[in-house]
Image: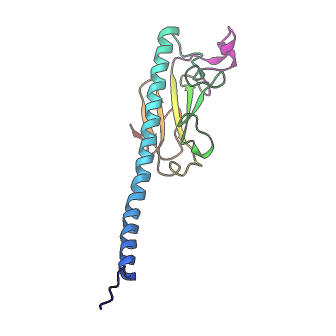
Amino acid sequence: MKKINSGFTLVELMVVVMIIAVIAAIAFPSYQTYIRKSAESGVMQEMLKISSLLAKHKAKNFTYKCFDLADYYGGSNNLTMINYPLNSNGNNIQYTLSLVDNSSNNQVLVDASCDDANTDTLGLAQQWAIIATKNPNNNLVKDKSFNFLFTSQGFRCRNKANNVTRSGCGGGGEQW
């Protein structure tokens, strides 16, 4: 009688493990790139949505004054920033979107005076800028992702460096 040995040799198992390791080494960075690009597309879409809401507000009020993100995204009164993805917190936040008055320096479109009849402290509020800043604590977006700028004049740019301001993307910026 012949004895039949069934099973795999150590060499065969090592070859299979190496093939799986190579596939994983190729797939994991591709997956991270996919997630990063998905976050970038989502934040650009959110910026376009906010710009549409701002256009509706100006058509109704003839100014961007007292446009409150809380009316659309919930939260406290006088909201000038939201996190993306929505309802995220801590290290899960990929981007923070800030809405500012672009026609006067260091002004916002909404503050406590919007609750009163007197909104003279807000400035002109005839232009806006949305700045999307990546979260430095989120490992998916902190190094290779872009910061974004979108203005009421239609200027759109992005930059991987952290030098995006309400007036531009600085050196290395590109259009989107």
Residue 122 in picture, x, y percent from top left: 63, 18
Give the quarter of the image for residue 97. Answer: top right
The quadrant in which the N terminus is found is bottom left
Which residue is at a point 40% across and 82% down the rendered structure image?
10
User: In this view of the protein, which residue sits in the foreground, 122 or 47?
Assistant: 47
Which residue is at a point 42% across and 30% down the rendered structure image?
155
User: In this view of the protein, which residue sits in the foreground, 163 or 70?
Assistant: 70
Which residue is at a point 58% across and 19% down the rendered structure image?
71
Vertical order, 57 against 51 (above or below) = above
Give the quarter of the image for residue 81. Answer: top right
Residue 12 in picture, x, y percent from top left: 35, 78
Q: Is residue 96 toward the left or the right of residue 21 in the image?
A: right
Residue 43 in picture, x, y percent from top left: 47, 36
Q: What colour scheme was applied to this rendering of the protein? A: rainbow
Which residue is at a point 46% across and 23% down the rendered structure image?
51
Q: Is residue 113 magenta?
A: yes
Vertical order, 116 against 81 (above or below) = above
Q: Is residue 14 toward the left or the right of residue 161 in the image?
A: left
Q: Residue furthest bottom?
A: 1
The quadrant in which the C terminus is found is top left
Residues rendered magenta in the picture = 106-126
User: In this view of the protein, which residue sits in the foreground, 112 or 101?
Assistant: 112
Q: Is residue 84 magenta?
A: no
Residue 134 in picture, x, y percent from top left: 54, 43
Q: Main secondary structure of the magenta part?
A: loop
Vertical order, 71 against 166 (above or below) = above
Q: Residue furthest left?
A: 1
Count of number-bearing discs = 0
